[in-house]
Amino acid sequence: MTRRVVVGAHYGSGSWLAQRLTALYMAVYSLVLAVVLLGGEPITYPAWQDMFAAGWMRVATLIFVVSLAWHAWVGARDILMDYVKPDGLRLGLEAATLLLLAVYLGWAAEILWR
Amino acid sequence: MSSAAAKKVRPKYLSLRALLFEIRQPVPAWVSILHRISGAMLVLPFAAWLLYLLDLSLASPESFARLASYLDLPLVKLGMLLFIWAYCHHLCAGIRFLLLDLNAGIALAPARRSAAAVLVASLLLTAFFGAKLW
């Protein structure tokens, strides 16, 4: 019998909640962007450029990428914990995932604030 | 007495053949594993690809025009179609999981129905956005 006291470590409840809240944000952002892209006439460069010149759009998109990184980290870690049993390999793949997500964040910031 | 159950070879060892052709997964299991696979695909390569496309679309009027012709390549369109399916499946299955988290539709019958609905809806959405792409 185990006498595990569920305090302190939280056993992943924080990650679980973060993954769902970031999912909600990305879902709303995606639906709004899909409506904008498909709603009107074909997008021209000036209209597209204007849209991403607005400060709120840049911030909303950066929040999307931050949400993506956080959400993907929880998901990728779940996958790696389930399927990759050797500790060293798993640690290496987790580090590679974090590095990849960090690159995405930096790249997105660079694109948005050129 | 020789019933059918008694003749079965036990224990039964798992093989690739068994996993692929003999063990039939229920529909919710397919939705679940496809949610994982589509999620992994969205992290790599699709997030990187989409960032590259966003970069092209915003860098200059010339690169925006180049993006338009790039998106006309058949292989690129095929990749886009795969991305659209992965995104739509991940979104639809994700909404289902959020509802399951809220204890909505967790009985066996509605859970199987919603799983089938996710598979159908994501394919229909892929067809819709794919048609827009062409």
Image: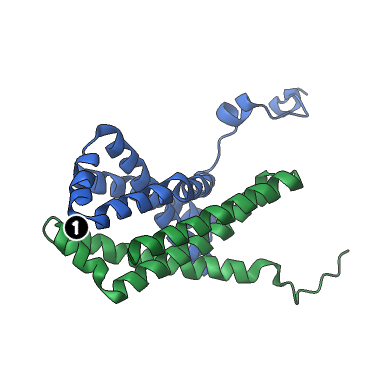
Chain colours: A green, B blue
Residue at the far right: name it. A1
Total numbered labels: 1
Q: Nearer the viewer, residue B59 or A16?
A: B59
- Image quadrant in which the C terminus of chain B is located: top left
Q: Residue at x 62, y 71 (%)?
A: A14
- Image quadrant in which the N terminus of chain B is located: top right
The picture places residue A34, in percent across and down from the top left corner, at 26, 60
The picture places residue A86, in percent across and down from the top left corner, at 75, 43
Q: Nearer the viewer, residue A111 or A58?
A: A111
Residue A64, located in which quarter of the rendered image?
A: bottom left
Secondary structure beneath dot 1 equals helix
**Position of residue B2 in the picture relative to residue B43 (left or right):** right
Give the answer, above or below, for where B79 lies relative to B40: above
Q: Nearer the viewer, residue B12 or B37?
A: B37
The picture places residue B59, in percent across and down from the top left corner, at 26, 56
Residue A49, located in which quarter of the rendered image?
A: bottom left
Q: Is residue B105 visible?
A: no
Badge 1 crowding class, 10 Å Cα cut-off, few under 14, some 14 to 19, many 20 or more, is: few
Circle 1 residue: A38
Q: Residue at x 43, y 53 (%)?
A: B90
**Looking at the picture, which amino acid does disc 1 mark?**
Leu
**Position of residue A93 in the picture relative to residue B47 (left or right):** right
Q: Residue at x 53, y 55 (%)?
A: B108
**Position of residue B90 in the picture relative to residue A73 (left or right):** left
Residue A111, located in which quarter of the rendered image?
A: bottom left
Give the answer, above or below, for where B35 lies relative to B78: below
The picture places residue A6, in percent across and down from the top left corner, at 76, 74
